[in-house]
Each structure stands twice: as C-alpha cells, then as structure tokens.
Image (cartoon, rainbow, N blue to C red):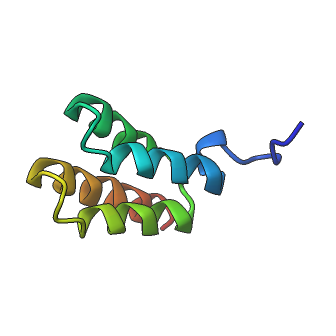
Amino acid sequence: MNERPNERPNERPEELKKLSTIATDMGFNADLRTKAIEQMGNATSQEALRALLDLAANDQLTVKERELALKQASKIIRSTQ
C-alpha cells in the first residue's frame, strides 16, 4: 500500500497536483473547481498551503475562487499554530 502512516490521502503531492489542476481548469464547472479548492484546504501540509496561495494569485480564476483559496490557506496556517 502506498499510503504513508498519519498522512491524509489529499496531502500527497500527486493528489494536491490533481486537485490544483481541477481547480484551475476552466473547462470544469465552478462547483467542481470550488470543491477541489475546499479539498485542498483540508490538507495541513506546506505543499497544500503553497498550492492554495498559487491559486489565490491566479488571475484566470474568479474572484470568489481566489478568495476561497485564500480562506483555505488561512485555515491551514491557523491549524499549524
């Protein structure tokens, strides 16, 4: 089994990459992109934080999606204190 102990599946870099790809693919509907961003916010890793900050800086996303990415990044920061 590939899973590392004590690590949530969505904290693996390949899962974060997939979620980030979904979140930035304008071919998907906004609900799916939003769910991907929310899933990324459930991770507690530095990789997830960086990925969310990259989404917040992506001017191709809607303002609502960018604000959600910032909110999720903030959630990660608060959880590590």
Residue 46 in view in this figure: yes
- In the rendered image, residue 79, in percent from the top left (x then y), is placed at 46, 58
Q: Residue furthest front?
A: 27
Number of dots carrying numbers:
0
Query: Closer to the camera, 13 or 75?
Result: 13
- In the rendered image, the quadrant that contains the N terminus is top right
The residue at 18%/59% (across/down) is 60
**Residue at 16%, 65% in the rendered image:** 59
* Residue 72 image offset from top left, x and y in percent: 33, 53
Q: Residue 67 location in percent, x, y?
A: 17, 55
- In-image side of 29 versus 36 (left or right): left
Q: Which residue is rendered at x = 51% and y = 64% of the image? A: 80
Q: Residue extending furthest right?
A: 1
Would residue 80 be found to the left or right of residue 59 on screen? right
Q: Looking at the image, which residue sits at the far left? A: 63
Of 25 and 51, the residue lying toward us: 25
Compared to 57, does 3 lie above or below?
A: above
On screen, residue 31 versus residue 20, left or right, reads left
Residue closer to the observer: 61 or 7: 61
Q: Position of residue 24 (x, y in %)?
A: 32, 51
Against 50, is 40 above or below?
A: above
Q: Is 14 rendered above or below residue 32?
A: below
Whether residue 41 is visible here, answered yes or no, is: no
Residue at 12% over, 48% down: 64
